[in-house]
Image (spheres, rainbow, N blue to C red):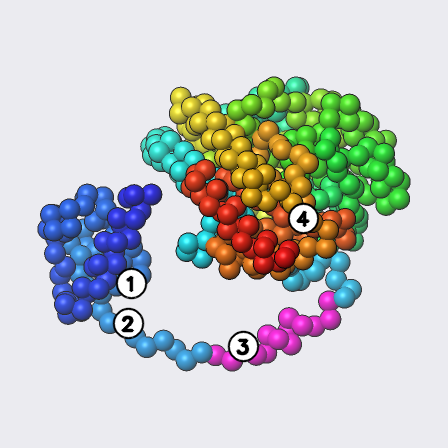
Amino acid sequence: MQERSSVDELAKQLRRELDRYSPGGKLPSSRALVERFRVSPVTVSRALAQLAAEGLVVTRPGAGAFRAQARTAPAPAGDTSWQEVALSADGAADLVPRSVDASGVLVSLAAPPPGVIEFNGGYLHPSLQPERAMAAALSRAGRRPGAWGRPPMEGLPELREWFARSIGGAVTAAEVLITAGGQSALTTALRALAPPGAPVLVESPTYPGMLAIARAAGLRPVPVPVDADGVRPELLADAFRATGAPAFVCQPLFQNPTGAVLAPGRRAEVLRIAREAGAFVVEDDFVRRLVHEDAGPLPRPLAADDPDGVVVHVSSLTKATSPSFRVSALAARGPVLERLRAIQVVDTFFVPRPLQEAALELVGSPAWPRHLRAVSAALKARRDAMTGALALHLPELALPHVPSGGYHLWPRLPDGTDESALTSAALRAGVALTPGRPYFSAEPPAAHVRLSFAAVAGTGEIAEGVRRLRTACDEVLG
């Protein structure tokens, strides 16, 4: 992060000084810039590359950097009003909608304004990401023979083998496909398992991004309630009987947003119910590597205990690394595997080989287990800091379940609370949070908010964020 800040600052300074040079004029040498600004040669190189990408300078190997020629005036804007008619044509009969509501996804992807504490983030703060290990892995990967060639369509065999071992049970590398992040894998799975217009069973509440995937594919999400022990099997069976849904999507481990873990007694029951319904279970095992230090042994993925091909398993490296490290896996057995493979090839061809090679380098390095241990300890400390601060400053927020994995809490708000009003008041107070409504595919039984403790700088920022949230609650709750 320090290097990135230095690059941005130097680029800003050089940008201000460009008027000193006529178009085509030569800028000072890299050595002169290093001495003048007391930065590294790498910083100078990256700052000049940034200006070159903006079209402000031109770099010539062996000659230096030169101010670019003046830009020509942009062409006048055309008339795009015709698109309103083209895009607004009646789509009521479309099985697959042409417009997509991405609001539930954007909440966790959009960066808050400067100075706002990020309680709505869905990824690790940069201080928790293994940036050096990822950079080293990418560097080593780029030097591997054939690293920039075309990979096998299903993914590198060694990476598929690593994911298969991570899942466990009888899962083999031949039953694994490498995909570009969990969102892509879920999209592929739902397209493979359910035709447009079909119902699909989902946990309630559940991840808004999954609801967006289902609706974008023309599917009808049908909620099945979750309690502290995960999805309720009797209600799952009722939902299959009532709808004939071909699939049930679930997160058995540290469910988003409740943090629930599917109880041991329910695991086999869920698989049995789906098998009797002739349906699939899509297992989104998204945060297995974000376990807290005090969690104890974790249950195996459902896929590890599924010999009959009921489970289509999704797991990813993204949550434990970086939003940009989009490497994940789809695992399935039986004829469905070929359908998954065909859809992925048509949609994306393959995951770029350098990224797959970098993933292999990362998970095979000594830095990987060290990183996971460090994140495990940090997440426990942050969870404890947030639960302690909430108990002290916001006791009216009910927190019936404190998870031992994942990156967020799911407090219930006092009855009658306006989630939107609280979210707006919190933003005015300087803290961004996620309202609970987007996590429900039908009317929610109560008001909630989701509070992330992984996307902030540390426990001090958590304490300050809860104090700001107290101010917002005083405004809204009275």
Q: Are marks 4 and 3 in contact (CB under 8 Å)?
A: no
Residue 290 x, y percent position in the rendering:
54, 31
Question: Left or right: 194 with respect to 122?
Answer: right
Q: Earlier in the sequence, mark 1 or mark 2?
A: 1
SS type, badge 3: loop
Which residue was labeled with disc 4?
413
Q: Is residue 88 magenta?
A: yes
Tell me which amino acid carries mark 3.
Thr
Which residue was labeled with disc 1?
55
Residue 436 x, y percent position in the rendering:
66, 50
SS type, badge 1: loop
Question: Left or right: 339 with respect to 377?
Answer: right
Which residue was labeled with disc 3?
80
- Say which residue appears at 66% left-offset and 22% top-offset: 299
Question: What label sits on residue 429 in the rendered view?
Answer: none
Mark 4 to mark 3 CA distance (whole Å): 45 Å
Q: Is residue 202 above or below residue 372?
A: below
Residue 474 makes an appearance in the image: yes
Question: Left or right: 381 with respect to 265?
Answer: left
The stretch of residues the image draws in magenta is 78-91
Count residues near mark 3 (Cα–Cα under 10 Å), then give few for <14, some for 14-19, many for 20+.
few
Count residues near mark 2 (Cα–Cα under 10 Å), then give few for <14, some for 14-19, many for 20+.
few
Label 4 or label 3, whichever lies nearer to me, is: 4
Tell me which amino acid carries mark 2.
Arg
Q: Earlier in the sequence, mark 1 or mark 3?
A: 1
Q: Is residue 453 above or below residue 295?
A: below
Mark 1 to mark 2 CA distance (whole Å): 9 Å
Which residue was labeled with disc 2?
71
- Say which residue appears at 82% left-offset and 37% top-offset: 236
